[in-house]
Image (cartoon, rainbow, N blue to C red):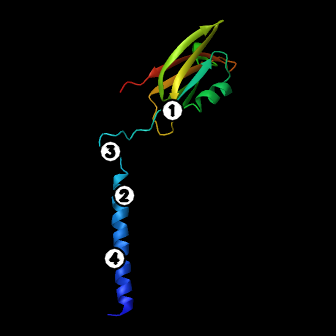
Amino acid sequence: MTNRMLSAGRLLSGIALLLVVVTVFLGCQQNPPGASLEAPELLMDRTIRTGMSQTQISSVLGAPKVIQHGSRGAEQGIDIWLFDVAAKGAVYQKQQGLEAMTLKVNVNPGVSSDGTVEVKFDENGKAESFTYQAKNF
């Protein structure tokens, strides 16, 4: 055998050993049995109040999933916006004639929504009322 063949054989053996070491190392990096693969909770308070404009509401809750324009009867001129949220419940407050709702919202991008916020706006585009409804699974 020539020196070139011996060098090529050693190189291939070295590469094979390196692949085994890397595979073992990566296998050790996996989650242990029973570990959760869910995204961590990143909770933030999001508060909306009666009298807020549509722009202010969307800056707090993001873009609405559904916008319903009132066009008949007592609902004429009233818009209803629906938002999907990943919230851990809602706290309602009333101070000095204004109502407020604070949601503990999980803002982690990998989390799916588990509730709906409905905001009704008056004919001037100001928040008139709102509700939070948790989805039942």
Rounded to the nearest whole Å, what is the CA distance between mark 2 and mark 4?
18 Å
Look at 50% across and 18% down and name the residue there. 90
Q: Nearer the viewer, residue 120 or 71?
A: 120
Task: Determine which residue is flagged by label 2.
Answer: 25
**Can you say which quadrant of the picture contains the N terminus?**
bottom left
- SS for tag 2? helix
Task: Determine which residue is flagged by label 1.
Answer: 42
Amino acid carrying label 2: it is Phe
Against 15, residue 130 (above or below) is above
Against 85, residue 4 (above or below) is below
Residue 56 shows in this picture: yes
CB atoms at circles 3 and 1 under 8 Å apart? Answer: no
Rounded to the nearest whole Å, what is the CA distance between mark 3 and mark 2?
14 Å
Rounded to the nearest whole Å, what is the CA distance between mark 1 and mark 2?
30 Å
Task: Determine which residue is flagged by label 3.
Answer: 32
Look at 36% across and 39% down and name the residue there. 36
- SS for tag 4? helix
Going from the N terminus, do you reach mark 1 or mark 2 first? 2
Mark 1 Cα shell of 10 Å, populated few (<14), some (14-19), many (≥20): few
Amino acid carrying label 1: it is Leu
Rounded to the nearest whole Å, what is the CA distance between mark 4 and mark 1?
48 Å
Going from the N terminus, do you reach mark 3 or mark 4 first? 4
**Can you say which quadrant of the picture contains the C terminus?**
top left
Amino acid carrying label 4: it is Ser
